[in-house]
């Protein structure tokens, strides 16, 4: 460390040695063998090492992922789910389970909540937002029914109170949990972009 204090080294190294090759070395502060000295110094010493600022080696940060589905019938109707607890109608979808892909979650949630088997046809939107203590990722898929004659779910259970196909005018007249079903109806009816899977 020469004449530098721990904090001086913490500030000096990234400023003057940012392009040094990545080689295993012994940390001059704690004497540990480290594979990436710059990262070790930044996160284990100086203000982060004392807990005065956040380290990049944070404890686990929860990532909550959700898959929603805008499923259009060939006749232009959209599939809606009647949410439990009288929350209104909404798009089929929900949380992605551990070890499940976003696509698999979209297909599973649509079957569970709406009783319809679907084929994903594209991606409408991906949203990512940081919150206090967690990160939220939402992927909104476009889909079509595998069998247009398949009837939506009509028996209530934990997943939903039921489901229905609705025209854009019907969607506008229903009590919705939020504005998204109507926004996506309009977007797709106006030829909005559907991105490839």
Image (spheres, rainbow, N blue to C red):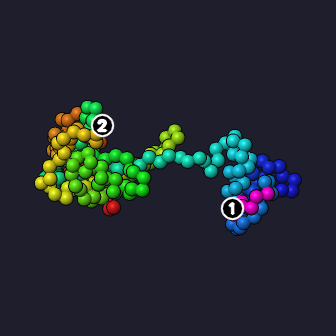
Q: From the image, which quarter does the C terminus lie in?
A: bottom left
Q: Which residue is mark 2?
A: 178
Q: Which residue is mark 1?
A: 36
Residue 186 visible at all: no
How many marks on residues? 2
The dot on residue 20 is: none
Give the percent coordinates (x, y) of residue 7: 78, 47
Name the element at disc 1: loop
**Marks 2 and 1, the one that precedes in the sequence:** 1
The residue shown at (62%, 50%) is 57
The residue shown at (22%, 55%) is 117
Task: Classify mark 1: residues with Cα within 10 Å, few (<14), some (14-19) or many (20+).
Answer: some
Name the element at disc 2: loop
Q: Nearer the viewer, residue 10 or 36?
A: 36
Q: Residue furthest right?
A: 3
Single out the mark in the foreground, 2 or 1: 1
Left or right of 197 in this view: 33: right
Q: Is residue 35 magenta?
A: yes
Q: Which residues are magenta?
A: 31-37
The residue shown at (37%, 47%) is 95
Give the percent coordinates (x, y) of residue 142: 27, 54
């Amino acid at each position: 460390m020469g004449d530098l204090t721990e904090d001086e080294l913490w500030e000096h190294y990234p400023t003057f040695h940012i392009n040094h090759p990545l080689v295993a070395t012994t940390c001059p502060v704690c004497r540990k063998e480290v594979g990436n000295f710059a990262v070790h110094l930044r996160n284990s010493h100086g203000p982060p090492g004392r807990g005065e600022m956040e380290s990049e080696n944070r404890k686990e940060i929860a990532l909550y992922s959700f898959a929603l589905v805008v499923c259009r019938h060939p006749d232009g109707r959209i599939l809606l789910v009647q949410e439990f607890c009288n929350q209104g109608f909404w798009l089929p979808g929900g949380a992605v389970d551990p070890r499940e892909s976003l696509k698999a979650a979209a297909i599973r949630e649509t079957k569970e909540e709406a009783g319809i088997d679907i084929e994903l046809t594209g991606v409408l939107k991906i949203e990512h937002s940081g919150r206090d203590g967690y990160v939220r990722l939402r992927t909104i898929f476009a889909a079509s029914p595998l069998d247009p004659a398949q009837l939506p779910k009509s028996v209530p259970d934990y997943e939903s109170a039921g489901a229905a196909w609705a025209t854009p005018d019907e969607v506008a007249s229903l009590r919705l949990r939020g504005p998204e079903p109507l926004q996506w109806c309009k977007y797709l009816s106006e030829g909005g972009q559907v991105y490839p899977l």
